[in-house]
């Protein structure tokens, strides 16, 4: 006569302590608590399927309580009664969960970003992932990318539009379209639903970034910069902006290793340029004077213009604009990017510099008579 097994109690399970050897506390009908010498307590179910003895892991205590373990045993028995192996069901569910995680919008998006961001400017790469993290992942991140339809994508974009960020909504639609097309190419989606949203958002007309281009108005701006009472690092960036007229991201991420005091040049590597072509900025005597002063303060670090919280990071991309507002110049009057338009206008209309020279120094792709882009010019 088989020995009758007394079911476990909650107290027995709770008080199960590790011993010199692994041991079991049996609940009956194949269910037991496996107590490991390390202290782990694991629920197991022994069963037979097609004449073969098998063991099913049901979780660990106390995450899985005695009551939970019994319910899982009951569920497994129902599968067995219907001729289904509960172990194979568990494997299939685990595989589906892994596949779901690998094919979620966020997983595919981060894979896409990692694969292609190396060819972008660091500013563009940071902005793109930040837009995804702020606006897209909270809504669509855990959804299977191949199951996302146009209405769900539009609802997410409308949330962005509703806060008055129409331009951002259009940019996010473009980013999502690139991600969906990557998913199609890698076999995780059938089509790009972003393509169905053409015309679904109100049109956005991009305007020029505000800039002061009248020489009579430039003078008060330069005097205001000279008298700026804020951070010395930010003031130095302001003083150099009209002398360099590079893009704001290129300026704020400038590194001391790129500055050559002997040849009076700033050599920006290709990977930090929008056009991915190395760029040389000649350093005037005025620029050198500012740089020598700045070097005494930040020269031991990596960046010319470090963040005020940490020398390991460049200053904020909003630092220049914030300083302009502090000096009284509104956002529809002057921006950090506006120094480029200022330089182009005055060099062309006032100083009569050749347009192709101006475009080269702005690091724009200048085209020859055959329409081919070239970016080199003799600066000597």
Image: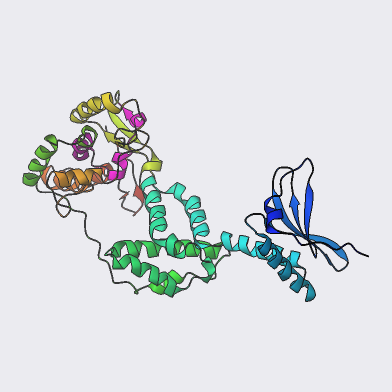
Q: Residue furthest bottom?
A: 82
Q: Image quadrant of residue 2?
A: bottom right
**Left or right for 136, reference 217:** right
Q: Residue furthest left?
A: 216
Q: Is residue 247 visible?
A: no
Q: Is residue 240 above or below residue 79?
A: above
The one nearer the camera, 264 or 59, is 59
Residue drawn at (41%, 58%), measured in percent from left and top?
132
* Residues shaded magenta: 236-260
Residue drawn at (69%, 48%), measured in percent from left and top?
40
**Left or right for 170, reference 32:** left
Give x and y (percent) for residue 1: 94, 65
Q: Is residue 194 above or below residue 307?
A: below
Q: Is residue 145 visible?
A: yes
The one nearer the camera, 319 or 215, is 319
Q: Is residue 200 above or below residue 170?
A: below
Q: Image quadrant of residue 220?
A: top left
The one nearer the camera, 14 or 363, is 14
Total numbered labels placed on residues in the image = 0
Residue drawn at (27%, 66%), measured in percent from left and top?
204
**Left or right for 339, reference 76:** left
Q: Main secondary structure of the magenta part?
A: helix
Q: Is residue 293 above or below residue 348?
A: above
Give x and y (percent) for residue 36: 74, 46
Give x and y (percent) for residue 65: 65, 59
User: Is-magenta flag for residue 258?
Assistant: yes
The one nearer the camera, 6 or 304, is 6
Give x and y (percent) for residue 75: 71, 70
The colour mode here is: rainbow
Residue drawn at (43%, 61%), measured in percent from left and top?
138
């Amino acid at each position: 006569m088989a020995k009758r097994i007394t079911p476990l109690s909650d107290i027995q399970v709770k008080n199960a302590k590790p011993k010199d050897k692994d041991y079991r506390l049996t609940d009956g009908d194949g269910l037991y608590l496996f107590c490991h010498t390390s202290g782990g307590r694991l629920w197991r179910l022994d069963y037979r399927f097609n004449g073969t003895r098998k063991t099913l892991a049901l979780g660990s205590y106390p995450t899985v309580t005695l009551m939970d373990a019994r319910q899982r045993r009951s569920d497994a028995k129902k599968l067995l009664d219907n001729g289904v192996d509960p172990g194979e069901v568990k494997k299939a569910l685990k595989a589906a969960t892994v596949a779901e995680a690998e094919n979620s919008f966020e997983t595919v998006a981060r894979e896409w970003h990692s694969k292609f961001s190396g060819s972008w400017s660091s500013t563009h790469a940071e902005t793109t992932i930040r837009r995804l993290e702020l606006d897209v992942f909270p809504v669509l991140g855990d959804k299977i990318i191949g199951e996302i339809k146009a209405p769900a994508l539009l609802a997410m974009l409308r949330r962005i539009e509703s806060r008055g960020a129409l331009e951002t909504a259009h940019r996010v639609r473009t980013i999502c379209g690139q991600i969906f097309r990557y998913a199609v190419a890698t076999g995780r989606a059938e089509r790009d639903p972003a393509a169905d949203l053409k015309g679904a958002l109100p049109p956005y007309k991009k305007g020029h970034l505000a800039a002061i281009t009248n020489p009579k108005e430039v003078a008060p701006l330069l005097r205001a910069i000279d008298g700026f009472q804020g951070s010395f690092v930010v003031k130095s960036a302001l003083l150099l902006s009209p002398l360099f007229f590079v893009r704001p991201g290129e300026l704020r991420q400038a590194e001391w290793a790129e500055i050559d005091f002997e040849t009076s040049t700033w050599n920006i590597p290709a990977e930090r340029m929008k056009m991915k072509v190395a760029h040389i900025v000649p350093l005037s005597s005025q620029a050198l004077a500012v740089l020598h002063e700045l070097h005494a303060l930040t020269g031991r670090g990596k960046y010319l213009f470090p963040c005020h919280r940490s020398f390991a990071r460049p200053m904020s991309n909003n630092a220049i604009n914030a300083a302009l507002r502090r000096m009284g110049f509104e956002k529809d009057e002057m921006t950090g990017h506006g120094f480029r338009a200022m330089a182009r206008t005055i060099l062309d209309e006032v100083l009569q510099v050749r347009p192709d020279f101006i475009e080269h120094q702005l690091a724009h792709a200048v085209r020859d008579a055959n329409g081919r882009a070239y970016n080199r010019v003799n600066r000597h």
